Image (cartoon, rainbow, N blue to C red):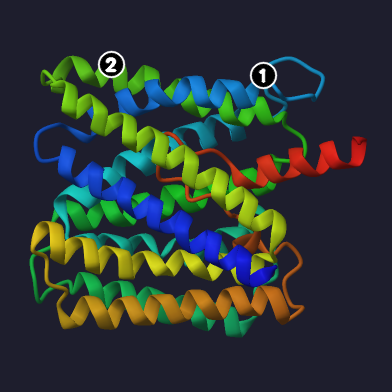
Amino acid sequence: MNIKAAFIALLAFGLFSSHDVVVKYLGEAFSPLQIIFFSSLMSFPLLTMMMVQDPTPGNLRPVHPWWVTLRSICAMISPACAFFAFILLPLAQAYALLFATPLLITLLSIPVLKEKVGAPRLIAVAIGLCGVLVVVRPGSSPLSWGHFFGIAAALSNALQSITVRKIGREERHVVLMLYPLLLNVVLSGVALIFVYEPMQLIHLGGIGIVAFFGFAATLMMVYAYTVGEAAFVAPMQYSQILWAMGFGYILFGEIVDLYTLLGSAIIVFSGLFIIAREAFGNRSEHTPVLRSRSRGLSPGSFSISLALRRKQQKNLES
């Protein structure tokens, strides 16, 4: 079943990469904030169907309002910054920066989850961050806003993932899904006043694809984590660098330079070491990277961990 789960995860990340290609294409004519507004709006019916099925009793008042607010803000920042990075940078370079997310989750787990991180994982984080420097190459090439947005997307994505690990068992699933979506719609809607450009039907269709691909790929990831072990599913996220290289070359004429390849390899191997350490090293109490399963870079996605927990709850009740 682990092989099946890994294969489904590969397909899901291929769908995520296709989602990012459409974002990059639309970004040539429209602001990422406009793309986020309409994709969030189109995702609303899909996510609403999931939210109304939440069997947990209670109201929509958060148990931890400050943590929910922080998660909602991060859930708004991470797709916005990721979209800017996809548009401004070659796809492979954008992914290389986003792959720093597991490294940042490991660091954030120390103050937030009180995780005890030993020397091997800390060294892996340090090496991985050096890989980020190899990709960015400060001093040898001009830094762009794309680099800033890529790093900001990784940081905000890591922060929202660690927040779910912090409060996920105490907050209703619907609360953790509803507030980030509403914040995305409201704030990107306000920004729309300043960035709106008229859209043709083909562009609206493209945004519909962004919303559907993000939702469908997340459902596939839920299934993959249901039938397989996290240690076999989680590493599949790094297949996106291959999708990015292929799509970037064929569709946008992007050629990956040596520094991006080298830096990506360093980041990927560091991330794989952390995943292996959490899965098989028996040194991690919270396994923050393995349990932070959501991609978190699409307004149409949702928390995989919360969906899995709800599915397990239904199985116990039946």
Q: Could you say whether the residue bearing mark 1 is in a helix, strand or loop?
A: loop
Q: Quadrant of residue 230?
A: bottom right
Q: Amino acid at mark 1?
A: Val
Q: Position of residue 235 (x, y in %)?
A: 53, 70
Name the front one of labels 2 and 1: 1
Question: Which residue is pictured at 73% across the width and 62% down the height?
Answer: 286
The residue labelled by disc 2 is 190
> Total label count?
2
Q: Quadrant of the C terminus?
A: top right
Q: Is residue 13 above or below residue 129?
A: above
Check residue 249 in the rendering and tell me which mark sits there, or answer none: none
Q: Quadrant of the N terminus?
A: bottom right
The answer to whether residue 110 shows anywhere in this view is: no
The residue labelled by disc 1 is 52
8 and 164: which one is in front?
8
263 and 117: which one is in front?
263
Q: Amino acid at mark 2?
A: Val
